[in-house]
Amino acid sequence: MEILEAMAAGRGVTLVPENAELTTVQAAEVLNVSRPFLIKLLEEGALPHRKVGKHRRVRMEDVMAYREKIDRERESVLDELAREAQRLELGYGRS
């Protein structure tokens, strides 16, 4: 459904097999982060990778799993903020 919506909106769509290996530039684009930030994630071990010569390669399925994890964490934080705003009556519920 997301693919069809993107295509209908005129956005480009690229299909990549799950077992594909991405360059750091490609992985950063998928995560919508800078390449230096992605390199930091790789060096911290937050995202698995392997070296091919002096170049790093990241599996697409690992990039997507990381993205889903971050999305879940972000949603959890937003839910907590909304609960706290309601508890403090910061514009939710009463007029």
Image: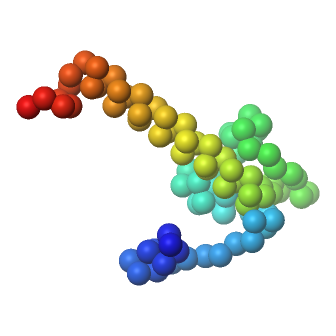
Quadrant position of residue 21:
bottom right
Q: Residue 84 in the image: x percent, y percent?
A: 34, 22
* Nearer-the-camera pick, 59 or 40: 59
Q: Residue 90 in the image: x percent, y percent?
A: 20, 25
Residue 10 appears in the figure: no
Please identify the residue farthest to the front as the structure is shown.
93
Q: Image height check: is 8 above or below 92?
A: below
* Nearer-the-camera pick, 43 or 80: 80
Residue found at x 73% / y 60% = 60
Q: Image height check: is 63 above or below 26?
A: above
Residue found at x 46% / y 74% = 6
Q: Is residue 84 left or right of residue 3?
A: left
Q: Image height check: is 78 above or below 29?
A: above
Please identify the residue farthest to the left as the structure is shown.
95
Please identify the residue farthest to the right as the structure is shown.
53
Residue 41 appears in the figure: yes
Q: Residue 51 in the image: x percent, y percent?
A: 87, 53
Quadrant position of residue 30:
bottom right
Residue found at x 91% / y 57% = 53
How many marks the image carries: the answer is 0
Quadrant position of residue 71:
top right
* Nearer-the-camera pick, 72 or 24: 72
Residue found at x 41% / y 81% = 8
* Screen quadrant of the C terminus: top left
Q: Is residue 20 left or right of residue 68?
A: right
Which color scheme is applied?
A: rainbow
